[in-house]
Image (cartoon, rainbow, N blue to C red):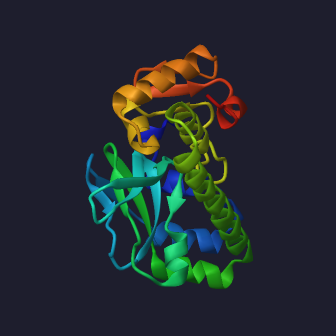
Amino acid sequence: MTETTQTLIDHLRSTIWARCLTCLEMARVERDCVEQFVPKGGFVCKRGEVLDHWTGIIDGLVKINNCSSEGKSVTFAGVPAGGWFGEGSQLKDETRKYDVVALRATRVARLPRATFEWLLEVSLPFNRFLLMQLNERLSQFIGLVENDRTLDVDTRVARCLAAMFNAHLYPGLEKEVQISQKEVGYLSGASRQRANQALQLLEREGLLRRDYGAIRVFDLDGLRHFQA
């Protein structure tokens, strides 16, 4: 089944964390989870909102970002289809610390907080999944700090793309991600033109190929260790 025709139930059953649930637990997840459509440029959630759901991306692409008091936008991560986020804020019982904005028309899955907390109470495997999720997220953000402070644009673009192929955070992506050059620029903190130049360089290096509205990766390890 293709990403664009995947139903909410199909999506839930394909997640890594669903594989560790019992039939009873999964039945409640499927009953309680709801789907929402967010148009391009719309907010999946806003900074300061009260948390009431754990959030996943059925299809589409979102960016997690904040704006400083001076108006500078800082992007922390891009989340493609298959990714779930917001578990840290759920666990800490706090309001959102960031905005999540749809970079294209996006279908969102929302698991109610009560169901999320129930899974924490009854499922040890689900708790183990969340430990892995938080550890991977921490590694991703540490890498983001390094990228932002020490790397040039070409290398930032390479690392940004490589980060989207994290098998735990974003399962389902194999060798191709549906993303435009403009979206690559948003996620790597570069203009569309500069991101395009970086992608051309990475293509000449044999690491990837630019297709219409997508990027196919040939050498993921090469992207992760690329240095301009």
User: Please, is residue 85 above or below residue 78 in the view?
Assistant: below
Q: Can residue 221 be seen here?
A: yes
Looking at this view, is 102 or 33 the one in front?
A: 102
Which quadrant of the rendered structure holds the C terminus? top right
Q: In which quarter of the image is residue 175?
A: top right
Spot occupied by residue 174 in the image (x, y as percentages of width and height)? 63, 35
Spot occupied by residue 221 in the image (x, y as percentages of width and height)? 72, 33
Q: How many marks?
A: 0
Q: Can residue 169 be seen here?
A: no
Image point 43% across, 30% down: which residue? 195
Image point 68% across, 60% down: which residue? 19
Q: In which quarter of the image is residue 150?
A: top right
Q: Quadrant of residue 100?
A: bottom left
Image point 52% across, 59% down: which residue? 84
User: Please, is residue 44 above or below residue 180 in the view?
Assistant: below
User: Please, is residue 21 above or below residue 166 in the view?
Assistant: below
Looking at this view, is 82 or 219 the one in front?
A: 219
Image point 44% across, 82% down: which residue? 94
Looking at this view, is 122 or 47 the one in front?
A: 47
Spot occupied by residue 184 in the image (x, y as percentages of width and height)? 43, 36
- Left/right placement of residue 129 relative to residue 94 reads right
Spot occupied by residue 123 in the image (x, y as percentages of width and height)? 69, 77
